[in-house]
Structures are given as structure tokens and as C-alpha cells.
Amino acid sequence: MFDLCKGAYMYLQKIMSNMTITLSTAFFLSGCSLYTGSPSWKTYQNERYGFEFPYPSNWQISKNPDNSDGIAFFSPKNQSVEIRSWVSKKLDNNINNSENYEYKNISHNFETLQGFPAILIIEVGEKETVMRLIINQEQLEYYWQGKTNSQEFQDYYQMFYYIANEYKISKFSK
């Protein structure tokens, strides 16, 4: 199974370089994760916007934005592996938010364990791959992402998926 999954991932990576894949492809890859660790977890909580998510307790905080809109953590083993979350206010409906514009035509394809409908996408690039979660609630857009170099994405897929699934928004009751 390992060789099949690794081969399938590498094939997808090659043909989908710089493209976005949706959750259906991600489900295929979910059985292919090489991530087998069980790290101890901490929970990051953002007081300003009321969101939280788990992160490995040994990961280090990157420089935090002064406005408290979000946070970033990086792996102590490899600083190019990071998880990041932030919030932005939606712009007027007639103006496309530059962060979310390319996903405007993707309907909700994911639901967090808390029950929030979301968009979960994987952007496969030649050098890096990003798993991104987007949740729209009232006038706010909540973003979470896990990023690593493309050659190591399969090592982090399961952990990134777990964190996206556990993402919570306490500001809005579901």
C-alpha cells in the first residue's frame, strides 16, 4: 500500500503542478499519509476573533502580526513546514476579496467537526504544497493552512487534515 500511495501522490503532484485539487482527491490521499506520529497537542486560541485549532506542542511560534489577526507555527525539525491561521473581514459583495477570489466558484466541500461548512483545498505546486481551509461566517473569513515543500507533503497530510477538521470558531454557535 505504501508504494502505491507514494507513487499515486508523486503522479498527482507531477500532473497537477501549480493546480488546485479539491477534497475528492484529498480523500484518495488520506489513506496514503506517511504521518504516523502522535504528537502531544496544544490549542491555539485567538481571543479577538474567537477561533482555535490544535497544533503540535513542540512547534514554535513564528513572528506574530501586531494586529492579532492570526498566528503561524513552524516545525522545529524543518522551518519550511508551517501551519498558519488568520481572519480577514469580507469586502463589499461587489468587490472580490483578493485572498478568496480564486475559490469563489468552489462550493462548500468540507465540514469541520464543529459543523461549520467550509472549503478545503490542496494547492500542489512544483516546490510547495498547501492545504487550505476557508470558513465564511457573517462578515469574516477564517483561514487556516498547512504548508510544506511538495516532496514532503505526504508526510504531513494526515496531520494537516486533522487540524483542519478540529478547527473551531467559538464566536458563533453552531
Image (tube, rainbow, N blue to C red):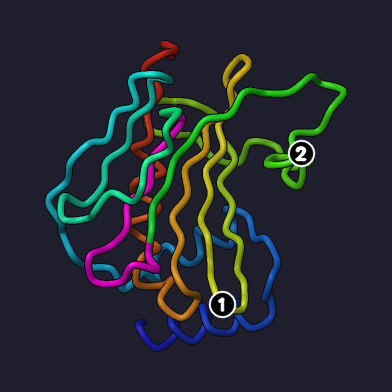
Identify the residue at image location x=70%, y=66%: 19
Say which residue appears at 38% left-offset and 47% top-offset.
Answer: 72
Would residue 72 be counted in the magenta stretch? yes
Q: Please say whether residue 97 is one of the residues in the magenta stretch.
A: no
Magenta stretch, main secondary structure class: loop
Q: Amino acid at mark 2?
A: Lys
Q: Quadrant of the C terminus?
A: top left
Which quadrant would residue 96 be assigned to in this image? top right
Residue position for label 1: 127
Residue 2, percent from left and from top: 35, 83
Amino acid at pointer 1: Lys
In the image, 36 versus 145, the foreground residue is: 145
| Magenta extent | 69-81
Near mark 1 (Cα within 10 A), the count class, few <14, some 14-19 or many ≥20, is few
Q: Position of residue 9 (x, y in %)?
A: 51, 78
The earlier-in-sequence mark between 1 and 2 is: 2
Q: What residue does disc 2 label? A: 104
Residue at (46%, 81%) from the top-left corner? 151
Tell me the tag on residue 159.
none
Q: CA distance from mark 1 to mark 2?
A: 25 Å
